[in-house]
Amino acid sequence: MAAETVLVVDDEDAVRNVLTRMLNASGYAAASASTAASALKLFEEGQRFDLVICDQRMPGMSGDECLERIWAIAPGQRVLRVAGAAHDDDAAPIAPGRGTPVLVKPFTMERLLASVREALSQRQ
């Protein structure tokens, strides 16, 4: 059985690299993108992922805008939004009925993996 694929979108190198390594070590096939634009390019080129983990605050294009554009390309895409604890507005739903869980920083590896499993189990 093939590993479930996860795309990590975060502009912070350290965060993106740690998340990608943790996911790969846990049996997922994780890829990463350092900008919302580079994540969108992957979808525009036809790549698909079982889950997208996307930071909300990134320069250029916000995580929410990135996810809306991804949904325009891949309407059933499952996502897990990552928000900083200091930014309560990041946890607000971006689209009613979309089911966009939010993982608030800082979080443990156990919480990350539990959130990933939950998001993947709710695939449409």
Image (cartoon, rainbow, N blue to C red):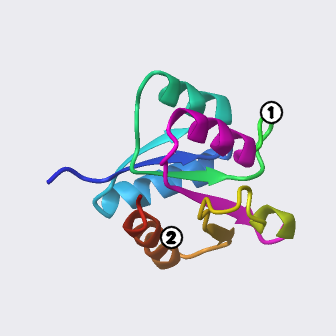
For residue 82, which quarter of the picture? bottom right
Quadrant of the frame with the C terminus: bottom left
- The amino acid sitting under disc 2 is Leu
Task: Give the farthest residue toward the front.
Answer: 97
Quadrant of the frame with the N terminus: bottom left
Give the residue displayed 65% in from the left and 67% down from the top: 102
Identify the mark at residue 107; answer none if there is no mark: none
What x and y, as percent, mark residue 72?
Answer: 60, 35
Give the residue displayed 32% in from the left and 64% down from the top: 26
What x and y, as percent, mark residue 25?
Answer: 32, 60
**21 in magenta:** no
Q: Residues within 10 Å of mark 1 (few under 14, many from 20)?
A: few
- The amino acid sitting under disc 1 is Gly
Query: Is residue 35 among what the camera can see?
Result: no
Identify the mark at residue 60; answer none if there is no mark: 1
Q: Is residue 11 left or right of residue 88?
A: left
Q: Is residue 29 left or right of residue 83?
A: left
Identify the mark at residue 112; answer none if there is no mark: 2
Residue 34 versus residue 36: which sits nearer the camera?
A: 36
